[in-house]
Amino acid sequence: MSTHALPTVAHPSARRLAASPAAAHALWLAGGFLLGFLVPFVLADTLELQRDVYYGIYATVVAVYVALWARTTGLSLRAAASRRLAWAVGLGVGVGAILALMVWRTEDSTPRPDGLELAAAVVWRGLVYGAADGLLLSAFPILAVFAAFAGTRLRRSKAGTVLVALVALSASLAMTAAYHAGYGEFRSAKIAKPVAGDVVWSAPTLLTLNPVGAPIAHAAMHSAAVVHSYETDTFLPPHPAD
């Protein structure tokens, strides 16, 4: 794990935040917790939007929010995505394979569509929704925490960097809990499973500080759920009520 600061670029909208960049990232992170809860609570739990429509709105909201966070704070997502790219992709694929195997081993096989309908579901429910989840639940909180501590005394030592990493992982776990709490079906002991899974799918981004690793791993897990357990009641929420 690097002890260097995340890459930033100068941007006029970031000047007013320059005096307290840590506070700026903390505010965006707090807003992310609220957003993560409200989007599923309002759109899925309350309005009960059709699942694929919901995924489209959710992915758009996540992409816009993360882009605004990066633009406002002056953090270069392009530069972040280029650091240790080979490692980030390799770890993302490797962790994704482990998660896919876990889906195959722990979930029951269910009926599924074939042909183009299955391919479309893999792309939309697996890749698009999975990548959006990985971005919001892992990449965003982890990078926001590291950016908040950039240039501090903690980041100048290996022990301090490990401490920051623990804070970043805690933020990711909290984001995962807040997001899943937005679904009525997860406001129970059921929430423990995705929170535990977050430790695994966050690893590629946590170890490289590259935002692409976690979305790759998460998309692989969702794609496996689509192919193997299309009618899953664990992955790919919201699930129709019985």
Image (tube, rainbow, N blue to C red):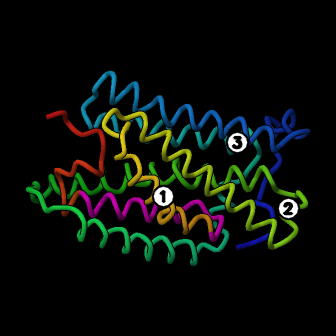
Q: Which residue is located at x 43 percent, y 54 percent?
A: 131
Q: Which residues are magenta?
A: 207-225
**In which image quadrant can residue 203 be found?**
bottom right
| N-terminal label among 3 and 1 | 3
Quadrant (top left, top right, bottom left, bottom right) of the N terminus: bottom right
Q: Which residue is located at x 36 percent, y 40 percent?
A: 188
Hey, what amino acid is under mark 2?
Leu
Q: What residue is disc 2 on?
A: 154
Viewed as shown, does residue 113 lie left or right of 183?
A: left
Q: What residue is disc 1 on?
A: 198
Q: Residue 109 or 127: which is nearer the viewer?
A: 109
Residue 38 vs 55, above or below: the answer is above
Q: Which residue is located at x 23 percent, y 69 percent?
A: 104
Is 26 a magenta residue? no
**In which image quadrant can residue 6 be found?**
bottom right
**Residue 40 percent location from the top left of the image:** 40, 33
Is 220 a magenta residue? yes
| N-terminal label among 1 and 2 | 2
